């Protein structure tokens, strides 16, 4: 959207008739102004399904265990928070959810884990990759060409903490790129909305709009209704949308039911996947 804003400003300054419209997309769901972004619903559906499978696997063992699932999200914890949708299907886990928006300390984490172990044999923890231990906020940052920080792996760090301080069976699982490239369990709502917002962008350009980003505006949760509108790209470029503070639990280790109501409509519906030789068919350029 930064490129969109700069390009549209450049063309406008030269009285060009070229129109520039931005179509948002990011599994991180961290773009401001829009209710959500195309791509997020499918990623959230994949993450929820994967965490549910991890829950089933962990439940079959007779010994106490802690499983830490590291999920994408550098500064905003939307994707990690979306694991709460499992509660709509009567799952208790993940028992602990940690987002970058919360203060986080090793001491509080260990206390939380011990409290959950007193109630559950197998404890499941969902944590955003961008969560930092207190005292590490000012460590030197190594970044890529886009200014994105290379993250060191909070899952492994927490696994070691549990191993050293609690001593039970513990493992960490980093979902990594599968979250953003998996297509075999995508959300039909997400796919349909991606086409809808793309089409709306073309219509806006043909109507003469330029320098705009298309957005979803949510009208209601139940029934789920959205409108597609446009906003000035400068209102979104180089800005981030964080998980709402009012949806975070008081203890900073969970999210509130309001989050379930927000996420649930975005993961609805299944897409029939074309298969060949038992494997999904990919469209390749």
Image (cartoon, rainbow, N blue to C red):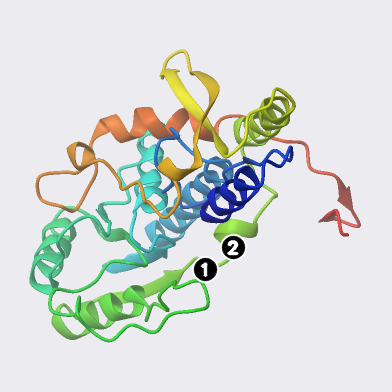
What is the crowding at mark 2: few (fewer than 14 residues within 10 Å), some, or many (at least 20)?
few
Q: How many marks?
A: 2
Residue sitting at the far top? 223
Q: Residue 134's quadrant in the figure?
A: bottom left
The residue sitting at 40% across, 75% down in the picture is: 149
What is the crowding at mark 1: few (fewer than 14 residues within 10 Å), some, or many (at least 20)?
few
Looking at the image, which is closer to me, 179 or 122? 179
Quarter holding the C terminus is: bottom right
* 128 left or right of 28 in image: left
Looking at the image, which is closer to me, 272 or 252? 252
Q: Residue 69's quadrant in the figure?
A: bottom left
The residue sitting at 70% across, 22% down in the picture is: 207
The residue sitting at 40% across, 40% down in the picture is: 86
Q: Residue 81 in the image: x percent, y percent?
A: 34, 47
Instruction: Label 2, secondary structure: give it.
Output: helix
Looking at the image, which is closer to me, 275 or 44? 44
Dots 2, 1 in contact, CB < 8 A: yes
Q: Residue 268 in the image: x percent, y percent?
A: 56, 30
> Measured along the vertical axis of the image, is residue 121 above or below residue 174?
above
Residue at image mark 2: 178
Q: Return the mark for residue 76.
A: none
Q: Residue 267 in the image: x percent, y percent?
A: 53, 35
Residue at image mark 1: 176
The residue sitting at 52% across, 45% down in the picture is: 40
Q: Residue 82 in the image: x percent, y percent?
A: 40, 44
Instruction: Quote the CA–CA distance across marks 2 and 1.
Output: 6 Å
* 70 left or right of 109 in image: right
> Measured along the vertical axis of the image, is residue 52 above or below residue 130?
above
* 68 left or right of 231 in image: left
């Amino acid at each position: 959207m930064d490129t969109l804003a700069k390009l549209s400003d450049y063309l406008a300054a030269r009285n060009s008739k070229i129109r520039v419209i931005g179509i948002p997309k990011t599994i991180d769901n961290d773009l401001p102004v829009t209710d959500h972004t195309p791509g997020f619903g499918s990623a959230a559906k994949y993450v929820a399904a994967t965490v549910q499978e991890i829950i089933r696997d962990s439940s079959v063992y007779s010994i106490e265990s802690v499983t830490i699932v590291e999920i994408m999200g550098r500064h905003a914890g939307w994707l990690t928070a979306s694991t709460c949708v499992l509660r709509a299907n009567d799952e208790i886990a993940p028992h602990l959810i940690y987002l970058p928006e919360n203060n986080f300390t090793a001491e509080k984490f260990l206390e939380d884990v011990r409290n959950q172990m007193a109630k559950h044999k197998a404890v499941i923890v969902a944590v955003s990759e961008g969560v930092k231990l207190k005292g590490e906020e000012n460590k030197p940052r190594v970044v890529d060409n886009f200014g994105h920080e290379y993250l060191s792996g909070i899952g492994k760090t927490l696994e070691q903490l549990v191993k050293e301080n609690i001593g039970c069976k513990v493992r960490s699982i980093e979902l990594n790129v599968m979250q953003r490239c998996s297509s075999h369990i995508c959300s039909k709502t997400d796919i349909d909305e991606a086409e809808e917002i793309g089409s709306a962008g073309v219509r806006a350009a043909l109507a003469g709009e330029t320098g705009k980003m298309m957005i979803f505006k949510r009208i209601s949760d139940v029934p789920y209704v959205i409108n597609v509108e446009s906003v000035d790209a400068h209102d979104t470029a180089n800005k981030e949308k964080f998980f709402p503070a009012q949806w975070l639990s008081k203890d900073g280790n969970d999210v509130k039911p309001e989050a379930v109501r927000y996420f649930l409509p975005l993961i609805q519906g299944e897409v029939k996947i074309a298969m060949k030789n038992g494997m999904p068919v990919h469209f390749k350029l």
